[in-house]
Image (cartoon, helix red, strand yellow):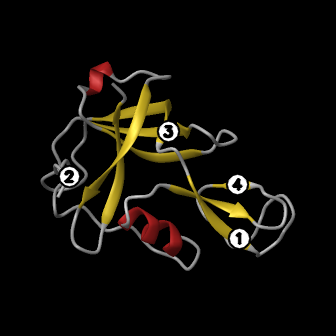
Amino acid sequence: MSERHFPDLMPSPGVTRESLPWWEAVLQGRLVVQKCNACGAERHPPCPCCARCGSHDVGMRDTEGTGVVYTFTVVHQKFIPGMPEPYVVASIELDGTDGLRVVSNVVGVEPSEVRIGMPVEVFFEHMSDELVVPRFKPRR
């Protein structure tokens, strides 16, 4: 079980037919992106068809689980009961992709120390037996 950064009262994410394989991979401790089997284009978040060629033949590809903070905001307002403020919501540009980004949190560092371009790595926060959420921490 990983260290918890967010409260139990945090709402569960919505899961769609397209995002289910992504959530299943995260549950296994893998950060993946969707890949078109027809033309090779990658994308995140998962969607029903390829924006490049229109194909519905898609799969998932593992990422390195590392990246850099592309942009971020520090939240100081109480939106979720039990959620300690401030916290960071960031867009992480994933290494080894063509500039794909995932929105997550940066933890394990004071919010005032987060910077654009900061190297980060994924870790998986176990919210329950059925839900694991990818978060990012500074790369050492």
Q: Position of residue 134 (x, y in %)?
A: 37, 53
Which residue is label 1 attached to?
58
Q: CA distance from mark 4 to mark 3?
A: 16 Å
* Label 3: element kind: strand
Q: Earlier in the sequence, mark 2 or mark 3?
A: 2
* Label 4: element kind: strand
Q: Earlier in the sequence, mark 4 or mark 1?
A: 4
Name which residue lies at 44% across and 71% down: 24
Looking at the rendered image, the quarter that the C terminus falls into is: top left
Q: Position of residue 126 (x, y in %)?
A: 24, 61
Q: CA distance from mark 4 to mark 2?
A: 30 Å
Q: Is 17 displayed left or right of 119 in the figure?
A: right
Q: Nearer the viewer, residue 96 or 137?
A: 96
The amino acid at mark 4 is Glu
Q: Earlier in the sequence, mark 4 or mark 3?
A: 4
Q: Position of residue 122 (x, y in %)?
A: 39, 44
Vertical position of residue 104 compared to residue 117: above or below? below
User: Which numbered disc, 4 or 2, marks the residue closer to the eye?
Assistant: 4
Name which residue lies at 66% across and 69% down: 59
Vertical position of residue 100 compared to residue 58: above or below? above
Name which residue lies at 49% across and 30% down: 68
Which residue is label 2 attached to?
6
Q: Position of residue 1 (x, y in %)?
A: 17, 58
* Label 2: element kind: loop
Quarter of the view holding residue 89? top left
